[in-house]
């Protein structure tokens, strides 16, 4: 009897943890909705009216980004289902609906090209990268080491390190800036 209660409690705790994680990811996606996040890493004083799609950002070397992006991959057994377009975990339909088998993620994804450009900008902007390295107690002297860390087993309770660093940026850097304004 006691053992079944313990199992039930663990299941409830796991569900609550997942729901809290989904809420955090939803807040992150909403904060990234303006398409100017790469600029905001490089110049946090820009106004929110500064609006252009990520691929046309003057702070992003698009060719270098595309080369870098090709090296990120996830292990489905370790990370679970991840959208290949936006790299969000597919753990809840209210966060990211499931991409149909055999369908184009780019055609079905609600958040194309939002997460990885920001992850790349975090690395390329030296002060932000140093803050991230300090927060995660790691160093990425070259971009391939950063890519390997993003693709590795998550360092804490997160589906991927990509989501972990984006949550870190949005929750500690972005929302702090918003509260000051």
Image: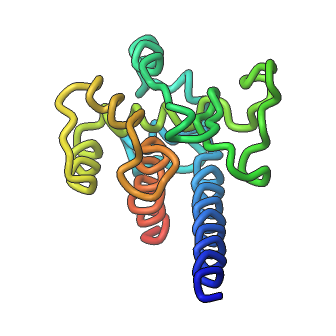
Instruction: Return the residue nearer the eye: 34 or 51.
Output: 34
Q: Kindly identify the residue that appears in the image at 26 percent across and 29 percent down.
A: 145
Report the label total: 0
Q: Kindly identify the residue that appears in the image at 45 percent across and 25 percent down.
A: 72
Q: Hey, which quadrant is residue 161 in on the image?
A: top left
Quadrant where the N terminus is found in the figure:
bottom right
Q: 138 left or right of 162? A: left
Q: Kindly identify the residue that appears in the image at 65 percent across and 68 percent down.
A: 15
Q: Residue 82: x percent and y percent?
A: 62, 36
Instruction: Return the residue nearer the eye: 115 or 153.
Output: 153
Instruction: Return the residue nearer the eye: 7 or 147.
Output: 7
Q: Residue 94: x percent and y percent?
A: 78, 54
Q: Residue furthest bottom?
A: 2
Q: Kindly identify the residue that appears in the image at 44 percent across and 11 percent down.
A: 63
Relative height, residue 14 to residue 63 (above, below)? below
Instruction: Return the residue nearer the eye: 4 or 78.
Output: 4
Q: Hey, which quadrant is residue 10 in on the image?
A: bottom right
Q: Hey, which quadrant is residue 143 in on the image?
A: top left
Q: Residue furthest front?
A: 1
Q: 99 left or right of 79? A: right
Colouring chosen for the image of the structure: rainbow
Q: Residue 56: x percent and y percent?
A: 55, 22
Relative height, residue 12 to residue 31 (above, below)? below
Relative height, residue 158 to residue 144 (above, below)? below
Q: 139 left or right of 39? A: left
Q: Residue 85: x percent and y percent?
A: 64, 27
């Amino acid at each position: 009897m006691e053992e079944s209660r313990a199992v039930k409690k663990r299941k409830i705790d796991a569900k609550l943890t997942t729901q809290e994680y989904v809420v955090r990811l939803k807040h992150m996606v909403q904060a990234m909705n303006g398409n100017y996040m790469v600029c905001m890493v490089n110049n946090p004083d820009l106004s929110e009216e500064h609006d252009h799609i990520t691929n046309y950002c003057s702070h992003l070397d698009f060719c270098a980004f595309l080369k870098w992006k090709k090296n990120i991959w996830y292990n489905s057994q370790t990370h679970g289902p991840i959208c290949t377009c936006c790299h969000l975990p597919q753990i809840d339909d209210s966060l990211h609906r499931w991409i149909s088998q055999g369908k184009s993620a780019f055609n079905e994804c609600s958040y194309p090209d939002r997460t990885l450009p920001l992850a790349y900008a975090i690395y390329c902007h030296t002060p932000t990268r140093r803050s991230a390295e300090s927060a995660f107690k790691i160093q990425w002297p070259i971009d391939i080491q950063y890519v390997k860390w993003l693709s590795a087993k998550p360092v804490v309770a997160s589906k991927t390190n990509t989501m972990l660093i984006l949550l870190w940026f949005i929750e500690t850097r972005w929302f702090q800036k918003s509260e000051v304004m």
